[in-house]
Image (spheres, rainbow, N blue to C red):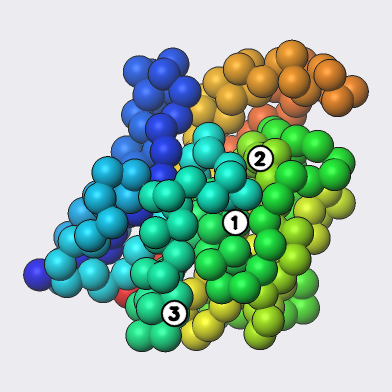
Amino acid sequence: MTSLVIIKTGDAFPEVVDQHGDFEQLFIEQLSAVLPAHLSLAIWDARLTSTPPANVAGAVITGSHSMVSNKEPWSEALKPWLQQALAEDIPLLGVCYGHQLMAAALGGISDYHPAGRESGTRRVQLTRAGQQDPLFSQLPESFPAHLTHAQSVMKLPTNTTVLAHNSHDAHQALRYGPRQWSVQFHPEFTPPVMHAYIERQRAALRDQGEDPEELLVAVTDTPDASSLLRRFLAFV
């Protein structure tokens, strides 16, 4: 049997892990109920081994509290695999750190955003290309999504299509090939997980002039963003 591999690139905060599960568990909860019979789910912790599981049919790359620009050895070791996956048309979906790492692996630049951190439930807008994209076209033109990131894709790789943006980040969603996408937002997050991240970041958010209480009140369900995970399975 072939596997949809969840490439683990980091751990969530301890209180998130205790109450809601680690990053990979959040993906498993979204995907397991709708997983096709021909697929199984496998976890590849890229921090522990550079060897992927056998029979990879597709991959989702998780978020992380690491920074792509730090070029940690395990992170750099993933880049050639991502390049090869694109060349072989293996379906990919990068999320947050996975989004930034895919862009960096394929010739772009990911680094700290000059406007600072983006956290909370924010609206994301599809581009014209996004409205015509096979994965994104069923989404409304504007939809809420959960976000928490200090780095962004600052320079696009060549031959990359921007599918979504917002006022903070011009590169909220990208397509690199026929079945290779990435998103800056977190389709796997639930409102309680988003709340926990804002609570943990209170001081940093205040320091950049944001009101954590307003961000907490604004957290809402994000069914359109979450639906991307289920729709991605159709391409695997």
Q: In which quarter of the image is the N terminus?
A: bottom left
Q: How crowded is mark 3: few (under 14 residues within 10 Å), some or many (20 or more)?
A: some
Looking at the image, tell me whether mark 2 or mark 3 is earlier in sequence order.
Answer: 3
Q: Residue furthest right?
A: 209
Q: Which of marks 1 and 2 is nearer the N terminus?
A: 1
| Location of residue 205 with respect to 54 vertically, above or below | above
Q: Where does label 1 land, which residue?
A: 100
Measuring from the top left, give residue 44's x and y in whole percent: 26, 51
**Contact, CB < 8 Å: mark 2 with mark 3?**
no
Which residue is located at x 32 percent, y 74 percent? 236
**Amino acid type assigned to the residue bearing label 1 in the image:** Gln
Point out residue 76 in the picture as x, y percentages from the top left corner: 46, 57
Side (left or right) of 173 relative to 50:
right
In the image, residue 151 lies at what x, y percent?
69, 45
Given the image, on which type of amino acid does mark 2 rest?
His
Residue under pointer 2: 149
Residue 121 shown left or right of residue 94 in the figure: right
Q: Are marks 1 and 2 in contact (CB under 8 Å)?
A: yes
The local crowd at label 2, few if under 14, some if 14 to 19, many if 20 or more residues have their Cα within 10 Å, is many
Label at residue 86: 3
Q: Earlier in the sequence, mark 1 or mark 3?
A: 3
Q: Where is residue 219 in the image (x, y as percent from the top left)?
A: 67, 30
Q: Can residue 142 be seen in this view?
A: no
Q: Is residue 149 visible?
A: yes
From the viewer's perspective, tell me whether residue 170 is left or right of residue 42: right
Label 1: how many residues lie within 10 Å, few (<14), some (14-19) or many (20+)? many
The one of 205 and 153 positioned closer to us in this rendering: 153
Q: Is mark 1 on a helix, strand or loop?
A: helix
The residue located at (86%, 41%) in the rendering is 115
